[in-house]
Image (cartoon, coloured by chain):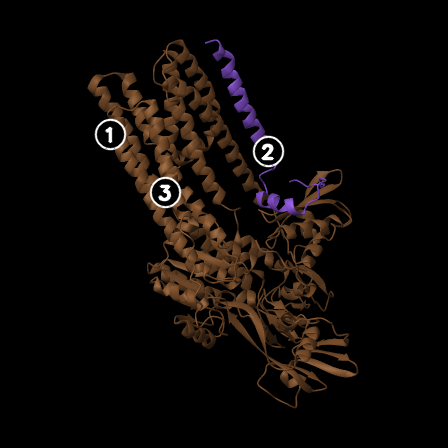
Chain colours: A purple, B brown
Amino acid sequence: MTDFFYLIPISIILGLLGLLVFLWTLRNGQYDDLDGASERLLYEDDRPRNDARP
Amino acid sequence: MSCCVPPAAFVESLAGGPNRGPSDNEVRLASRALGDGLRQSEFSVPSIHCGACIRTIETALDSMPGIVSSRVNLSGKRVTVRWRDGESPPPMVHRMVELGYEPNIFSLEQAGRDSSFTGLVRALAVAAFCSMNIMMFSGSVWAGADGPTRDLLHWICAALTLPALLYSGRVFYQSAWGALRSGRTNMDVPVTIGIVMAFTLSVYDTGVSGEQVYFDAVASLIFFLLIGRTLDHAMRERARNAVKGLARLAPTGALVIDEVHGPAFMPLAEIAPGSMIAVAIGERIPLDGEVVTGLSALDKSLLTGESLAEPVGPGQPVPAGALNVSGALTIRSTADETGSTLSRLVTLLEDAEAGRNRYRRISDRAAAWYSPVVHLAAAMAFLGWMIANGDLHNAATIAIAVLIITCPCALGLAVPMVQVMAARRLFEAGIMVRDGAALERLAEIDTVIFDKTGTLTTGLAAPIASSGSVEALTMAASLAARSRHPYSLAIARSFRSAPDVAWTDVEEKPGLGIEARYKGHLYRLGRASWSSPAEAGDASTVFSRDGVSLAAFTFADQFRPHAAESVKTLLDEKLRVEILSGDRAALVEGIGAKLGIAGRGSLLPEDKFHRIEELEAAGHRVLMVGDGLNDTPAMARAHASMAPGSAIDIGRNAADLVFMKNDLNAIPMAIAIARDANKLVRQNLALALLYNAVALPVAIAGFVNPFLAAIAMSASSVVVVANALRLGWRPLVRNEAVSDLQDQTA
């Protein structure tokens, strides 16, 4: 029964973490250009470019 | 995806010379200051289509001095450039035009719509988090937790519902409030009432250690409904406004030659009729007028759809918007800005776009009678139970169960899910859809009207060499590449090959052709009577050496692939098909006869517009397929509209659907997919109603508990989604049989 009291917060916190990571990727513009991302894979060098993000 | 062939440099001059794209001033005005002397510009570049395009543009732009960084967005076909603010912006527009990617300014107000989509996704993510965690705890309750454990789990659920209720639910409250304020009701009104009341009652029940709470229903309702809303929104492209594009097409000013004050560049609004205006090669005629001096050819394709440049000389009228192709002209204006051909088109287009916005979506129509029924049922259940046993709490619980179980989850998913599937199928076939409403309208049409030039036909004059050796043709092409006349460009395009000839003394003779010297001989390419006066043939254009004909060309517009076949398919579908064209009547009728349909020629944009109005007034639903400016008002007026990808910007903006492949089969295919989608939408609505018809009596009778509500709600949504996915099952039906008429020259 007492397991409950830390398992519940843990599960919620883990879920929250996932949500926050998703919101971060959204804000970071990682879904802005899904087509482009799949094409860039073929053309880009491994070192990061100096990107202009909107 | 197929890869792009880097276009040769001269082809870019085809549509209007080196000054295409926004000017430096426009670029600066539309750019955003980032601080530290940096500015950011966004361009919309429709011709970006593959990974190689990304690389080409980014490499070229990044190597330019003054540019800090650039990034291409392939999905949005946009380029973002950061540049250091100097005296003038780096010539990035020019560079992109050179590469064959013509940029348009991507204004910030257009970008604004994207952020509302991001907001929706964020709300969806929060709702997903809340509803899934609540489901986890509700599962424990259903599994038999009771006493203080159940109460604790209920309180946790209540806390987890709050973000969904307060943050994600706003979308619905705003929409419901907007509807109520204007005296209407929509689907969001019962949703809002349902979730707010269910939450309130559940909190009360939790407080008194009740057994049944609806937190899971509240959160998953918000989640499911938001999925529908997000899908619907994803279909919608940025707001496109054809009118604005049209206005931008007109030159902002003109060089007025005034005998008293000398030449001055004046804004159009200040130029009075009767002013003398100089129009250089490659410029558009700024105002309606007549030619005073100069010989040239005018490309009126934007206005009339006529593909072949028309020679003009002194005394002849010239319309605003026509492109001056081959010689400098001086014109006397006959109208001021408001009376000009272009501004008449703008007015017409504004009227048409206003009319278009009155269309009511199928989901709105369903909501209009659905939501009163739901309210009524909930109210009746409440009253009935109050009368039956007078238990306020019991009556309220049942009324809320009715609201929840009839909540239009399935209805909310029924339409957008199908339309997203349809849009995906269309996309695979190279057809872009503007939004879901466009699909609904396309499914309803019974008449198809084609423009001729550029729509039924390719719009590019294709040269046919009627005589001449391969060498002569190659030489002609190399000479033709030095001219900007559409005919020359067509020849250069068709017969181009290395090596280039070292021409000297190249001179373009307006109205006649182009001449040059090579190894002591005089070569001419142009009008037959000028190029080789001695031998008058029936060829329109002759390439000659010292007056002796080496090669002769005739020009013809060609049908797009599968023109005849797709017209036949449309006729088989019992659709009425017509051609409305600005081109010569005899020509249009001839083409109509070849395709077996009626054709009307010599129509002004207004005439097309009125013809469509006439048909719509007679109860027909018209699909207008066109590409030029002259079709734009008609396209905006028609029930639905399509444009080829080669259409001008404004044409594409006015169109509901744009087909990217050259092939006219896109039209019957789009109609077929739209009709399939429509059928599925109706099936889905019927399924959703059926579910309600079953669930409603059960809910009113008071047999619904939270567990049942959750199962019923999810099940109905899954059924509707699964039905929508059926649209993807059947393979694309494409008739590959090549009709005899195909590719025949018009």
Indicate the amino acid at tag 2. Answer: Thr
Chain letter of mark 3 equals B
Residue nearest the viewer, comparing B137 with B313: B137
Above or below, B668 against B232 in this view is: below
Residue B256: where, in percent of width, then height? 68, 65
Name the residue beneath numbered marker 1. Answer: B697
Amino acid type at image mark 1: Pro
Q: Please give the chain letter of the residue carrying mark 2.
A: A
- Residue B126 placement, left or right of A42: left
Single out the mark in the foreground, 2 or 1.
Answer: 2
Q: Quadrant of residue B552?
A: bottom right
Q: Please state which of residues B232 and B144 is positioned toward the viewer in this rendering.
A: B144
The residue positioned 33% from the left and 42% from the top of the image is: B685
Protein chain holding label 1: B
- Determine whether the residue tagged by mark 2 lies in a helix, strand or loop: helix
Give the number of the mark in front: 3 or 1: 3
Q: Residue at x 29, y 23 (%)?
A: B398
User: Circle 2 sits on which residue?
Assistant: A25
Q: Which residue carries the number 3 mark?
A: B723
